[in-house]
Amino acid sequence: MRVGPLPSVLSPEANPLQKLEEMTGALSAGLNTPGARGPGLGAAAPPMGVGGVMRVEFSNFLNKAVGEVEGKMRSAEVEKTKVLTGEANNLHQATIAASEAGIAFSLMVEVRNKLVESYQEIMRMQV
């Protein structure tokens, strides 16, 4: 049920993915990215979003998230290997690492599903 009129963000010539990135740029504005510097620290000024809010590219945000999940999966594998080879006898740390990696992967899959669903909804919009 719609409460009010939809904002006119999409024009016939606009790329839906580009508009999605622009709309979500404000959401990722507060994220810390490695190597990102603010103005006055010898780096170029970061891209500015709506209202002068600093924004991070959506693709960079997704790449960072996937990298973090991959890191958790690798650390869980290392912990499992240590326990299986007898290098470590702390099974609880290996189990915690495996659970953490599994939850992170499940979250990543759900976020991907929501993004695909959102993209499909945008593509179904009549302009």
Image (spheres, helix red, strand yellow):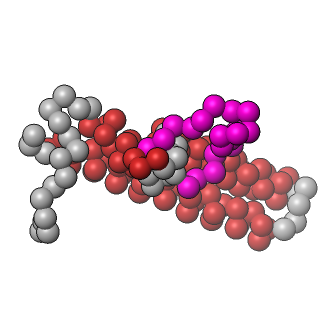
Q: Could you say which is closer to the camera, residue 108 or residue 81?
A: 108
Reply yes or no: does residue 93 show up in magenta.
Answer: no
The spot of residue 62 in percent (x, y) is 50, 44
Magenta stretch, overall SS: loop
| Residue at 41 percent of width and 50 percent of height | 51
| Residue at 28 percent of width and 50 percent of height | 118
Residue 66 showing in the rendered view: no
The spot of residue 72 in percent (x, y) is 67, 53
Q: Give the residues in magenta.
A: 30-49
Reply yes or no: does residue 32 show up in magenta.
Answer: yes
User: As displayed, is residue 90 above or below residue 34?
Assistant: below
Q: Could you say which is closer to the camera, residue 20 or residue 53?
A: 53
Q: Could you say which is closer to the camera, residue 42 or residue 16?
A: 42
Q: Is residue 5 left or right of residue 106?
A: left
Q: Residue furthest left?
A: 126
| Residue at 23 percent of width and 32 percent of height | 14
Q: Quadrant of the N terminus?
A: bottom left
Q: Is residue 6 left or right of residue 45?
A: left
| The quarter of the displayed image where residue 10 is located | top left
| Residue at 60 percent of width and 35 percent of height | 45
